[in-house]
Amino acid sequence: MKNKIKNIKYGLLIIVVSLMVSCNENDFLKEVPSDFYSPENSYVNMINFESSLTDLYAKVRAIHYSGDEYLNTYNLLGTDIIVCARGTDDRLGNYATGVIPTNWTIFQFWRDWYKIISNANTMLARLDASKLTDVQKVKVEAEAKFFRGFAYRNLVYLYGGVPLILEEVAVPKADFTRASKTDVLNQVVSDLTAAASGLPTIDKVADGKVSNVVASHYLAETLIALGRYDEAIAAASVTINDGNTALMTTRFGSRATQNPYDALLKFTKPGDPFWDLFQVGNQNRKSGNKEALWVIQMEVDIPGGLIESTTSGPNRWERNCNPAGWLTMNDPAGKQGMTTKPYSDYNGGGRGISFIKCTDFFLKDLWVSDFNNDIRNAPHNIVRDLVYNNPASAYYGKSAVLPNGTLNSSTWTNQKWRWYPYPSKNTTPGQHPDAVYENKELGTLKASASSTYRDMYMLRLAETYLLRAEAYLAKGDKGNAAIDINVVRARAKANPIADVNVTIDYILDERARELVYEEQRRLTLSRTGKLVERVRLHNPQNAGNIKDFNALFPIPSAEIEANKDVVLEQNPGY
């Protein structure tokens, strides 16, 4: 799977959604071109269809982990738990300027998800005329419908009702109209139901491929949005009760016998299974990981692997999310306190550059009840200290962080964004690829180091437990909701939640503790109708500029203008 994914040129969305325009002559006058690729000769055998399916995986990966910082992070920024680290208007520091119909990133989401829909529709349209066996047709149909349903799932939570296109579009069109949100959700249910019944089981798929339990998870999520709670519980239970899935509750994988280490921070707590989940090589099933349901595959310096060691390229979560604590910072005596080099360690967090960070709500409020015992908040899982690392400084080996959380420095008084506590899951201390080290013995990194050099989770079983808890709560069954939440909290060594205290806000809090930087937080908050409310409560940076209508993105103005034959309605407020 990893070596197959290629960067295939994208077709245009909606206005020209097919690779070639079909001929209008009678069938007996049609010619099937043999010297270049077209829909007529590109979908004949299983190799053709597998190539197109691989491209769908590549497109999903690009939306979440390409080198486009804004595309990758816009569904995290401006939420209750993630903000622009520098406090400026860019990186969604201001909804008034960042969420508008002409915003390029908002257009990219629309365009790229519709590309996936277009390609899936073309595959489905070509199945009957292909040379695939009946068994192969079932598999391809299920996988194509999964991606179509998954794309509409993303679109409907971001934009509300959107044009519902279910057939191959072979000629230019400019008369698309929006379906209702309910109609779109019902189509997602239809597609994911087909996917859940036709996809292989998780133990039969290659690394990175979707399976029946992945489809069942997103089916459950969609059924909750439609108020069909018993069906949602049943769908989530398919994933949870599958004998091939389980939460990882004991140490496993490449560092199962090791503890987190940093020469300066001097961790005292041992490693834990939550830490193991994010170590290099531990994401796929061959590591013993039964919690991972859908893993986005990454390789360094391998064609199709996405990440390159020589450039500050894709999957730049370390660069974007981690602080720039390694940069020039004087100690309290006015001497250079840091060596100004990035290190493959926890102290500096790799080569972070302080673009996005967690809110104080995430870093402080969410851990009050279990600050010391919840392993997800252990010092190696959320790094809350920075130690001077310049041996020439009198403060070498001493903390640069005061008890109130501010820096004990003579230089960064007006640039507090340069350092902040950070979840370590976005970096790989001691596990960076050899090619990005400036000096591996010292642990210093080159300027090209910027990526998170491991495979990335799209979906873990912990999320399915919290999703089923949401369905139980919605139908009034707080007892079973608490049971599911406490499965996740038990692994974290956190105190259990009592039935009476279960609310949708508590579930959203638990999702943040468990899934920060993994889940698309904007989609979760939009899906539950909580985006605006929780931003105003927990995000001071955006509380004053988010408006009620920002619960949805605007329809991109470029799409409205191109749809010249019929009015494509804009969302209210824009």
Image (cartoon, rainbow, N blue to C red):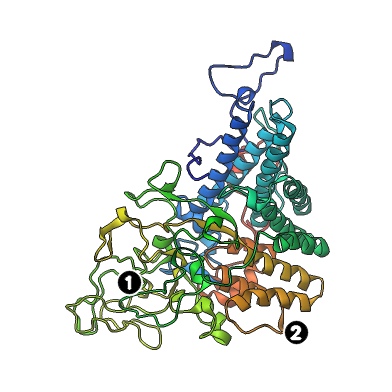
Instruction: Identify the disc placed on residue 500.
Output: 2
Whether the residues at callouts 1 and 2 have beta carbons within 8 Å, the answer is no
The residue under label 1 is which amino acid type? Gly
Query: Along the line of sight, which residue is nearer the eye, 273 or 546?
Result: 273
Say few, some or many: other residues with alpha carbon within 10 Å of mark 2 (under 14 / 14 to 19 / 20 or more).
few
The residue that disc 1 covers is: 325
Q: In the rendered image, which quarter contains the C terminus?
A: bottom right
Q: Residue at x 16, y 78 (%)?
A: 392
Please, is residue 295 above or below residue 542 in the view? Answer: above
State how far apart marks 1 and 2 are (Cα).
43 Å
Q: Position of residue 121 (x, y in %)?
A: 68, 36
Q: Residue at x 72, y 47 (%)?
A: 195
Horizontally, residue 344 falls left or right of residue 359, namely left
The residue under label 2 is which amino acid type? Val
Please, is residue 50 above or below residue 194 in the view? Answer: above
Q: Position of residue 248 (x, y in %)?
A: 58, 68
Query: Along the line of sight, which residue is nearer the eye, 297 or 335?
Result: 297
Please, is residue 192 above or below residue 288 in the view? Answer: above
Q: Decide if residue 529 is in sight here.
A: no
Farthest front residue in view = 257
Say few, some or many: other residues with alpha carbon within 10 Å of mark 1 (under 14 / 14 to 19 / 20 or more).
many
Farthest left residue in view = 392
Q: Disc 1 or 2, which lies upstream in sequence?
A: 1
